[in-house]
Structure formats: C-alpha cells, structure tokens
Amino acid sequence: MKPIYLDNSATTQVVPEVLEAMKPYFTEKYGNPSSTHFMGMEAQKTLDDCKETIANSIGAEREEIIFTSGGTESNNIAILGCANALKKKGKHVITTKIEHQSVLEPFRALERNGFRVTYLPVGKEGFVSTNSLEKAITRETVFASIQNANHEIGTIQDMAEIGRICSGKGVILHVDGCQGFTKIPIDVSRMGIDMLTLNSHKIHGPKGIGALYARSGTRLEKIYGGGEQGNDIRPGTENVPGAAGFSRAAELASRNPGRDVRRMQTLRDRLAKGLLKIRDSMLNGPKDRRLCSNVNITFRGAEAEAALVALSSKGICASSGSACTSRSVQPSNVLTAIGLSQKEAFSTLRFTLSRLNTAEEVDYAIEAASDIVSGLRKLAAR
C-alpha cells in the first residue's frame, strides 16, 4: 500500500522536477564555486542564480542571501552571530516560549554567557501579544527572534506589526520562516524583517540545504572558522546541487501559490472536521490565521505514541510534534505554553499536509484515527 504521508511539517517528498534540476551538478557541473577555472565559475554562477530566485521570493536582494545546511544552522548563525556582534551595545534579547528548539537552544547558550533573555508568553491559540513585546524592549535590547508560523499548532503571527515595533525601537528582528515559507506571504522589507531563516526540505526540495537572509548592513559575527564563503559569515564549500534543488522547489511553489494554499486549506478543514467528530477531541491553535497545512488535535484518554504506532501499521505517517523533539520524554514546549496539561500534551497528534495529498487520503486517515483512538481508550479503561 502506498504510504499516506501526513507529516509534511517534518519533511516533504522531493518532487521529480527538483531532482532533475539537481542531477547535472553531481555528474557534469560539479566544480567548486571557489575555484577560478571555468567549472568553478560555472558553479558560482549557478549559486548566484539560485540566490536570486530565493531573494525574489521574499523581496530581498541576491547579495543578502547566504546558503546554509538548513534551518538549524541558519537560526544559530543569526542568533549567536547577531548577539555576539552587538553585545557591546546591549545584552538583552527576546524570543517566545513556542519557538523551535533550534531557536531556543541558542538562546539558552546566550543565557549561559551572560545575556538576559525574555521568553514572551503566548495566548491559548499561540499568538504573541504585541503589547507584551513592546513592553519587553529596553535600552539594552539588541534583537528579537519570533517565528512567523508555528511548527506544531500552525499559528501565524502578525509579522508586519511585530516588525513595526522592533524597527521603531531599533531592535534587530530575526524570523524563523521555515514553516511559513511559500505558504504565507513573506516580504522582508514590508514586514521589517532583518534576518530570515528558510529551508528547502519543507517545500519539496532536498534536505541539507537552507538559507539565511541577512539585510545589508546587519552585523553578524562568524560563529565558526573557515574560508570566506557565505559572505564571510558561513564558511565551507557551498552545496551547489542542494542550492539548485532549493531554488527549483521555490520556483515551483511560486507558480500558483494561491491555488495550492486553497487546496491545502480545504483538505485541512476536511481533516480537522472529521477528527473532531471523535469524542473528547480538541483542536489546538487558532481556527483562523492558521497554516493551510496544519491540524493539531488532542485525543483525551489516548496515548499519542501508541496511536502513532497504530497509524503507522496502517500506512499513515503523522507525528506527536516537531520531528526534532519527537523522541523526547518531555511534553511539547508549544503545547504547555498554550495551557495544555502534561497528560493532554502526551495525547496530542499533529497531521500536516502538502500539495500532494488527496481527499481520499484524508478520509482514510480520519477513519483509521477514529478506530485507533476508540481502541486505545478501551484498553486504558480496563
């Protein structure tokens, strides 16, 4: 049976057009972009063209794009690099309680090195209060990192207002845009975003390639040694095949984004409606201003890990949260931040869609989940 893949916030299938775009850079055009011969120059031109494509998709300039190994590296470069570069100006930084671990861990590292970190709370739907952000900013605040869309519950923040506040206070704004890229509009100039993290494998591109947008003039300190690649910020030989795949995936996503988003929204609503018919179930996150791909449901009295095993046995791939923390014994920081108990957090499943999913797959998943949850509750009641 063909797998029914509903874990697209963890990663997505590489589509054939992306794979074809990458192939020549493994076997024919394999030069190192730093080399001065014709194959090296060819590789460098490819990188420049790929940067242009990514830049155009977010309203940036080509020179402001740095290719990285993915979202985690981009987040670390942005957060640690900016904090270290600006520490003489101030050692207060801001983030939220619902960020991805690749954002939270660098902030914890900053705390260990003498920075003061404010972790903004969120409401029950995962929204950051712009009033609380404004009040948290002091003369010592140098930057803030706030995601545009949440990886677990799909909440879409008001980035234009957040950007306005940060810009007005002279605070550098970094945004983890990995989940929202190509699903919600991103315009770094209009939204006042100074740094933006993107990655490829959430948009049907290859793993191991991401990008950091850093507005011209934004100060970043190199966080590890090496050559002068990556605007002298991210050393190391660039992943040219990955960049070609990432660029092609971004092009494909921009062909008719409204159509793809509407289609995913329809499937999302169908999936949520069907799952909420299961007794004692609860949707986490907002009904509106929610990612088109995200359904996060608590099934009270049904242990999530057992449900995932049972779903997998039926050919359905889902998750209990972010893939980077799915094996943790701790409850989700996102779910506890919006007020769920530990027991509820451990009874929560995340289903996430892509443009490749179908209504038939959604209906099958609803039927399977209903049977599985009912069975687990009966076992728990014995």
Image: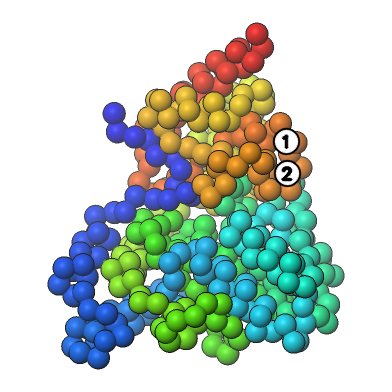
Which x, y percent locates residue 362? Answer: 43, 34
Q: Residue at x 72, y 82 (%)?
A: 87
Q: Nearer the viewer, residue 359 or 249?
A: 249
Query: In which quarter of the view is residue 302 placed?
Result: top right
| Residue 44 visible to an observer of this rendering | no
Q: Can you say whether 334 is above or below 87 in the image?
A: above
> In this figure, which residue is indicated by the disc labeled 2?
336
Which x, y percent locates residue 192? Answer: 62, 78
**Disc 1 residue type (three-letter):** Gln
Q: Residues within 10 Å of mark 2 (few under 14, many from 20)?
A: some
Outermost residue, front side: 225
Q: Can you say whether 25 is above or below 207 in the image?
A: below
> In this figure, which residue is indicated by the disc labeled 1?
342
Outermost residue, left side: 28
| Residue 103 visible to an observer of this rendering | yes
Q: Residue at x 37, y 35 (%)?
A: 4
Q: Nearer the viewer, residue 87 or 152?
A: 87
